[in-house]
Amino acid sequence: MTLAADDLDALLDALAARAAERAAGELVNVAGDPVVDGRAAGRVVVAPGEAIVSLWGNLTFDQTTVTFASVAERDAQWANPQAGATCYTEADSTFWQRKGPTWVTTGSPNRYACRAVPAAYTTSGAAGTATKVTCPNAPLNQGGRYNTATGVYTCAEAGLHLAICHGQFLLASPGGYIMSMLRRNGVEAARHTVASDSSTGGYSSPMTVDLENCAAGDTLEWWCQSNMASQPMRANTTESYFAVIYLGP
C-alpha cells in the first residue's frame, strides 16, 4: 500500500503526538470524565479506541484492592496512596483503607481478638498482694496482640476494647476472698471480688468484664489478689481465661 505524502505526514504527526502523550503520562479523557490535578476524582470512562496511558494504570492501581505480603512491603511499595485506597496484607489477614495520612483496618473489627489460658493451677501470690496472671497458652490470638511470655495485650488501634478476666480459684478456708482485676497501662481499670462460697472453702470464680476506650499502643493485663497466700486457680479452656476483643473505633 502506498500513502500519499500528505497522508504520510498526517500519520507521522499523529504517532508523534501519541508518543509525546505517553511520555508525559497524561490522561486522555473523554467529555465528562472528572479529573482534578491530573487524578481522577471519580469513575474514569474509557472510550473505544482510546489509549490506556500510564496515569490510567496508576488510577487502576490506586482504586483496586491490592494484595501485599506484609505491612512493611505495602509501605515500601506504596508510600503515598490516595484517600480511599484499599489493600490487603497476607501476613495478618487484614484489609486496610487509607484515611487521611494513615491506613486503618476495614471490615470486621474483631480481627484483633485473643483468648488466652493460664498454666494449670496458677496461684494468686502472697496474701494481699496483686499478682499478674500470665497465660502461656493462647488458642485464639488474632493479630498476635497478646504476648504469652509477658501476659500483656497491646492494642493495635484506637477504639473500644472488651476485656474479660475470668478465673476459678480454690480458696482454702471460709472468710477468704479473691479478686480478678483488669489493668490498663499498668493502672487498675476494673475489678470483681468474690468470697469463699462454703464453710470449708471451695471454688470461687471472680469475672471482671470491662469496656475500655483505648489508644493504639495501650496495654491490658489480667491481675488477681487474695487475702490468703497462694490460692490456686484452675486452668483449662472453660474455667479460667483472659479475653480481649477489639470492637472498633
Image (spheres, helix red, strand yellow):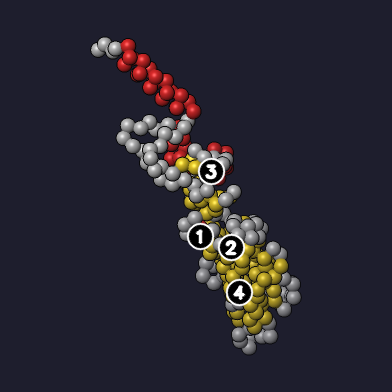
- Look at the numbered discs 2 and 1 and tell me whether their residues touch, using CB distance below 8 Å: yes
Per the rendering, the mark at residue 208 is: 4
Mark 4, Cα crowd under 10 Å, few <14 / some 14-19 / many 20+, is: many
Horizontal side of 211 relative to 13 (left or right) equals: right
Q: Position of residue 43 (x, y in %)?
A: 41, 45
- Measuring 65% from the left and 75% from the top, which residue is drawn there? 191
Per the rendering, the mark at residue 109 is: 1
Per the rendering, the mark at residue 159 is: 2
Cα distance between the residues tagged 2 and 1: 10 Å
Viewer-proximal residue, 8 or 139? 8
Residue placed furthest toward the left = 1
> SS of the residue at dot 4?
strand
> SS of the residue at dot 3?
loop
Residue 158 higher or lower than 201, as above or below: above
Q: Residue type at mark 1?
A: Pro
Q: Residue type at mark 4?
A: Thr
Viewer-proximal residue, 238 or 152? 152
- Measuring 72% from the left and 78% from the top, which residue is drawn there? 227
**Total numbered badges shown on the rendered structure:** 4
Q: Foreground mark, 2 or 3?
A: 3
